[in-house]
C-alpha cells in the first residue's frame, strides 16, 4: 500500500465521516489530521475552500468536496465499484446522496447544537481544534456553541416555527430507512453506493453518536443503527462481496416523498433567489415558512442533478419517474437553474498553487 492520504478534518465531522467510510470501503489508506487554524489556511490556499474534510495526496495534489472525491476515485480506482452501472440506479444513488448531504445537514446541526446536553459535549470536543489559541477552555467552548448555533441553526432558518419540520426531516428519514435496512444491507441493495455514504454523514457522526438523536435512533430504528456500524466496518472485500444493484427497489417511496416534498422545492427556491441576487431564500415546506441564506453551492448541486436527470435515456428516465412518483418535482428539476453558480472546484485533483482568489466557505460564499 502506498503512502496514506492526509485527511484534514475531525472525528466529530459530518462530511469527514462520510469520506472516511468511503475510503475504508475502498481500502484507500489515509491518516486523519485534526484541523486547526494553520492547516485550514494552508488547505484553503490550495483548494480555495474553507471547510473540512480536505485531502492532501502524497504527490502534493489536493482533493476537496466529498461528492467530487467519491467520483474522482470511482474514475481512477473503480474496483470495487460503488457506482451503479445501470443509469436509473446511478441517478437515484446520486439524488439520494445529494439529498442526504444537504437536506439532513440542518437537522444534524440542530440536534447537535440546540440541545444543551449535546452542545456541552461537542463544544468540549471541538475546543481541541483551537489549540493554537491561548484562551481558557470555557471561552473556546463558548466560541463553538455560538458559532455553530448562529451559523447553522438559528442563522440557517431554525426557529420555534420551523423546528418541527426540521426535526421531521430526521424522523421521517429514519422511518423511511428502517424497513429498507431491515430487509437488505444497504440502501439500494447488497452493495453500498453513493446513497449510503451520503446518508452516513449525518446518520453516523451526528444522529448515531450525539446523545439526543442517538437515543431516538436506537429506540425507533435499530436497523438503521446496525447499518451505521456496517458502513463503518467497510472494506474492499466486504464492498466487493455484494452484487451491484441493477434495478430500483420498489420500497423507496417514503424516502422520495421527503425528497420531493421538501428538498427539491427548496433547491428550486434557492436557485431562484440566487439568480435574483437575493441573499436570503424564502420558501414554504409542509405549510411552514423558511427564511435562510442563499447558497451558491446548492445551485451547483441542483444543476448537477438536472444534467444527470436530463441525460438519462428515455427508458431509464421512465423507471426513475415511476420510482420517485412525484408528478411535479422531477419535471421541475429537469429545468436548468436560471443562473448557474460559478464552479469553485473544477476538476480533481487540484494541482498545488498559490495565490488563488478569495477562498469561499462551505456554501461557496466569499469568506471576506
Ligand atoms: N460539500 C462539502 C461540504 C463540507 C462541509 O460543509 N463541511 C463542514 C464540516 S462537516 C464544514 O466544514 N463546514 C464549514 C464550517 O463549519 O465553517 C463536502 O461534501 O465535502
Image (tube, rainbow, N blue to C red):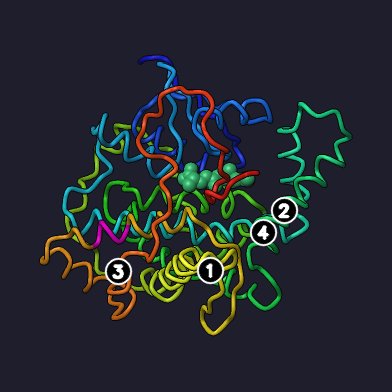
- Do callouts 2 and 4 mark residues in contact (Cβ within 8 Å)? yes
Q: Closer to the observer: label 3 or label 2? A: 3
Q: How far apart are marks 3 and 4 (CA)?
A: 39 Å
Let me know if residue 14 appears in the view.
no
- The magenta span reads 305-309
Residue 241 point in image, percent of width and height: 24, 39
Q: Distance between the residues labelled 2 and 4?
A: 7 Å
Q: Identify the mark nearer the N-term, 2 or 4.
A: 2
Please tell me whether mark 1 sits on a helix, a strand or a loop. helix
Q: Closer to the observer: label 3 or label 4? A: 3
Dot 2, how many residues are within 10 Å of its Cα: few (below 14), some (14-19), or many (20+)?
A: some
Residue 304, quarter of the rendered image: bottom left
Q: Identify the mark nearer the N-term, 1 or 4.
A: 1
Please tell me whether mark 4 sits on a helix, a strand or a loop. helix
Instruction: Determine which residue is flagged by label 1.
Output: 171
Instruction: Determine which residue is flagged by label 3.
Output: 335
Instruction: Determine which residue is flagged by label 2.
Output: 118
Instruction: Determine which residue is flagged by label 4.
Output: 212
User: Which residue occupies 76% across, 26% down?
Assistant: 132
Let me know if residue 24 appears in the view.
yes
- Do callouts 3 and 2 mark residues in contact (Cβ within 8 Å)? no
Q: Identify the mark nearer the N-term, 3 or 2.
A: 2
Residue 341, quarter of the rendered image: bottom left
Residue 131 point in image, percent of width and height: 76, 28
Amino acid at each position: 500500500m502506498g503512502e496514506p492520504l492526509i485527511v484534514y478534518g475531525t472525528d466529530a465531522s459530518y462530511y469527514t465521516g462520510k469520506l472516511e467510510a468511503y475510503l475504508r470501503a475502498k481500502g484507500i489508506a489515509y491518516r486523519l489530521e485534526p484541523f486547526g487554524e494553520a492547516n485550514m489556511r494552508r488547505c484553503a490556499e490550495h483548494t480555495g475552500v474553507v471547510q473540512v474534510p480536505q485531502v492532501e495526496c502524497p504527490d502534493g495534489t489536493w482533493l476537496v468536496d466529498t461528492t467530487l472525491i467519491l467520483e474522482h476515485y470511482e474514475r481512477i480506482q473503480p474496483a470495487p465499484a460503488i457506482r451503479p452501472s445501470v443509469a436509473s440506479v446511478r441517478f437515484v444513488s446520486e439524488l439520494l446522496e445529494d439529498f442526504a448531504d444537504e437536506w439532513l445537514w440542518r437537522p444534524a446541526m440542530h440536534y447537535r447544537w440546540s440541545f444543551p446536553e449535546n452542545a456541552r459535549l461537542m463544544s468540549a470536543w471541538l475546543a481541541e481544534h483551537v489549540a493554537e489559541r491561548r484562551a481558557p477552555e470555557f471561552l473556546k467552548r463558548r466560541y463553538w456553541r455560538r458559532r455553530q448555533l448562529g451559523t447553522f441553526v438559528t442563522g440557517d432558518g431554525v426557529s420555534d416555527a420551523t423546528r418541527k419540520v426540521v426535526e421531521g426531516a430526521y424522523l421521517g428519514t429514519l422511518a423511511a430507512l428502517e424497513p429498507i435496512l431491515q430487509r437488505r444491507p444497504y440502501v439500494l441493495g447488497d452493495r453500498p453506493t453513493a446513497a449510503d455514504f451520503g446518508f452516513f454523514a449525518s446518520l453516523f457522526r451526528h444522529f448515531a453518536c450525539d446523545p439526543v438523536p442517538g437515543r431516538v435512533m436506537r429506540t425507533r430504528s435499530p436497523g438503521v443503527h446496525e447499518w451505521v456500524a456496517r458502513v463503518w466496518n467497510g472494506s474492499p472485500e466486504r464492498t466487493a462481496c455484494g452484487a451491484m444493484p441493477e434495478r430500483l427497489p420498489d420500497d423507496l417511496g417514503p424516502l422520495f416523498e421527503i425528497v420531493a416534498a421538501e428538498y427539491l422545492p427548496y433547491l428550486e427556491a434557492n436557485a431562484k433567489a440566487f439568480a435574483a441576487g437575493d441573499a436570503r431564500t424564502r420558501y414554504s415546506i409542509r405549510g411552514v415558512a423558511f427564511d435562510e441564506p442563499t447558497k451558491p453551492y446548492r445551485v451547483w448541486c441542483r444543476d448537477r442533478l438536472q444534467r444527470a436527470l436530463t441525460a438519462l435515456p428515455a427508458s431509464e428516465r421512465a423507471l426513475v419517474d415511476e420510482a420517485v412518483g412525484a408528478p411535479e418535482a422531477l419535471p421541475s428539476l429537469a429545468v436548468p437553474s436560471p443562473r448557474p453558480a460559478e464552479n469553485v472546484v473544477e476538476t480533481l485533483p487540484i494541482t498545488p498553487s498559490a495565490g488563488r482568489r478569495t477562498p469561499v466557505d462551505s456554501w461557496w460564499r466569499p469568506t471576506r
